[in-house]
Image (tube, rainbow, N blue to C red):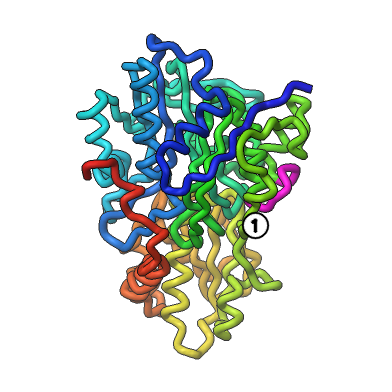
Amino acid sequence: MELSKVSLVKFNDERLNIRRAVEMCEGFRGLTSAKKVLLKPNLVMWDEVLPFPRFGVITTALVVEEMVRMLKEHGCSDITIAEATTEDKAINSGTLEAYRGMGYHQLEKKYGVKLLDLNRGPFEKVEFDGFSLNIAAPVLETDFLINLPVLKTHNTTKVTLGFKNLKGCLSRRSKIFCHHAELPLDRFIQRLGEKLAPALTLIDGIYALDRGPAMNGTAHRADILIASRDMFAADVAGTMILGMDPAGIGHLAEHARRHDLPLDGSNLEICGENLSSLVMPLKWDWGWLEDNSGPTAFGRMGISGIHYPKYDHTICSGCSFLNNMILILLIGAYTGEPFDNIEFLTGKVARSTGGFKKTFLFGNCIIRANRDNPAITEAVEIKGCPPRAEDIVRILNEHGIKADFNTYIQYRTSLAARYHDRPEFREDHFSVAGE
């Protein structure tokens, strides 16, 4: 059996160790100065309005900058950084805003790097087995794709590493399509990873995220760098370090089946640190009440009179983030008295079975799924793809739920406060040198 080389290196605030991770796995083998190189970090979201702890959520600027520096030393002149950050004007979230906030324009000045917003396309339609996806043309056209995900868990796919990071190369419509009512999300992720097949994957584990992929998870300083020319091998190692069995990760199990690969790590040639010494088991899921009426926090607080079923794989990233906001607003609106027998539905497939005074339908997809549902007494439509935060607050209040956005601001402030006065969580890791 052919082994795939995976380097495991401790970061320890030494930039040299990023270089070591790449060199130990022969990451630039086959790369010539004439080739077009494209770097795909994970800048899933940005926020210039509310407190935004970035630890474990997005790829550090430090790793991106060091990779660019190594490529320039290698003789590469055609280097592009490309991402498609979630767009939300209310919080100034977007790819260019993230680039600006992290000082990426310094990379343009210093190294002549090109910065692309993949949200703008152009896209090419690519046929797979039974479906098609629109993939950003620059990613398909590059000669040498470098994948720079974060070491973090995910509330539906369990992990979001190399394979999952490539979902950011899709058009917005294709991203939504991947949260399909009938096909599993992991199938789309696997096929996309198989198609794009990065030349090098470096998982940025300077910070690792528990219950990711967004800031409501808990970050840990991990100081782990995982690099391989084989993305599947890198993801298997990353999954094991997160304390999970790769066989339980849908897209990894699917890839192993299609390519006759083991899932126990027996095909990995580990260089550097011993993998078992790096294992740090993290949680990926959020607890829900046994009757599926809401998160476990509802039970602890005695909240009743509300039915809020758990999200499923059909809820898209934009709605998923705001779904958390709704839960916080509802907790803040709780006065000690039961809610008035209300229901909230999300995603694409949930159908109300009735018995509630009001059924709140969050997002256009679930509105369509229940448009002609005779079981609903009164449908309250929160329209949008995703809905706007201000509309959510307004509609809740119009229907007797005293939602106060200040509650959510306080919550976001508390998330950021987790990392205050903890010197191991360094903001400068998210700013290009000189910023």
Please determine whether, in this image, residue 69 is positioned above or below residue 377: above
Q: Nearer the viewer, residue 317 or 182?
A: 317
What is the crowding at mark 1: few (fewer than 14 residues within 10 Å), some, or many (at least 20)?
few
- Using residue 82 as the reference point, say whether residue 261 is left or right of it: right
* Rendering coords of residue 389 (x, y %): 34, 61
Tag 1, which secondary structure?
Answer: loop
Number of marks in picture = 1
In the rendered image, which quarter contains the C terminus?
top left
Which residue is at a point 56% across and 56% down the rendered structure image? 370
Residue at the top extreme? 34
Residue stretch in magenta? 242-248
Q: Nearer the viewer, residue 246 or 354?
A: 246
User: Is residue 269 located in the magenta-colored stretch of the structure?
Assistant: no
In the rendered image, which quarter contains the N terminus?
top right
Residue at image mark 1: 281
Place residue 291 in its image quadrant. bottom right
Q: Nearer the viewer, residue 62 or 397?
A: 62
Residue 233 in view, yes or no: yes
Which residue is at a point 36% across and 75% down the rendered structure image? 407
Please determine whether, in this image, residue 235 is positioned above or below residue 54: above
Q: Indicate the amino acid at tag 1.
A: Pro
Which residue is at a point 35% across and 74% down the rendered structure image? 410
Please determine whether, in this image, residue 164 is positioned above or below residue 425: above
- Using residue 180 as the reference point, say whether residue 67 is left or right of it: left
